[in-house]
Image (cartoon, helix red, strand yellow):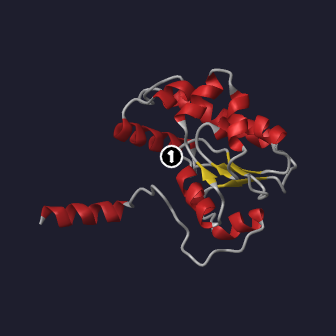
Amino acid sequence: MSDTIKVFGIGLNKTGTTTLGRCMKILGYNHKSYDLELLKKHYEGRTDEVLKYAEKYDGFEDWPWPLLYKELDSRFPGSKFILTTRITPQKWYGSLVKHSERTGPTEARKLVYGYTDPHHKKNEHIRFYNKHNAEVRAYFHGRDSDFIELCWERGDGWEKLCRFLDKQNPDTLFPHANKSPGRLSTIKKKIVSFF
C-alpha cells in the first residue's frame, strides 16, 4: 500500500469522472475506477470488503466510491475528496441519457438509481443528483483542506486540482475525456461525410 494521501472522486457518474481518473493517472496515483463487483458488495452490505479493497489504491472515481464518502473518510483519515459536478443538473441528466443510449440497460444503473434506463425519469434522477451533491457539501462544510468541488465545464483544470492536491501542474494538456463535440464540430463532420 502506498503512503500517498488517498484521493476520492465522489461525483456521480457523467460528471467528468473519467477526466478526473485520467488526471490521477498523470499525477502518478495508483488509480481505481468503476467496479461493478465492488458496487454489488456495497449493496449486499459487504461494505467492509470494499473498504479493505481500497487499501490497495490511492486514487478513486466512479462507482462505488461516491456512495461511500462517509465510510471512506472514517476509514482513511486525512484523505482528499473531490466532488465533480456538471454546469447544471439538466446537463448531467442529458449526459446520462446519451450514455444509456450507447450502453443499454445496466445493472449498476439499476442498483444506484433504481432504474436500468434514465429515459422518462428526469425528475427522479435530478432529485438524486441534487440530493447527493447537497449531502456531500453539507458533510464536508468547512473542510477546505480535505474537500473541493470541481466543474470542468466551468473551466476548472490543472491549476485548481493540483493546488488542492499539493502537486506540480504537469507539462501536458488537461485530459478532457468523453467531451461531447461542439455543435460546429458536429456540423463539420456531417458536411465532410456528405461529400
**From the image, which quarter does the C terminus lie in?**
bottom left
Which residue is depicted at the point 60% across and 79% down? 171
Q: In the picture provided, is 195 more to the left or to the right than 153? A: left
Residue 169 vertical placement versus 106 (above, below):
below
Residue 179, horizontal then vertical, whole percent: 45, 57
Which residue is outermost to the left?
A: 195
Q: Position of residue 35 (x, y in %)?
A: 55, 39
Which residue corresponds to the image point at 74% horizontal and 56% vertical from the top-left? 2
Camera-nearest residue between 37 and 131: 37
Q: Which amino acid type corresponds to the residue marked 1 in the rendered image? A: Lys
Answer above or below: position of 21 versus 113: below
- Which residue is at the front of the view, 54 or 147? 54
Tell me which residue sits at (58%, 55%) in the image. 21
Comparing 111 with 184, the one in front is: 111
Name the residue carrying label 1. 91
Q: Quadrant of residue 42?
A: top right
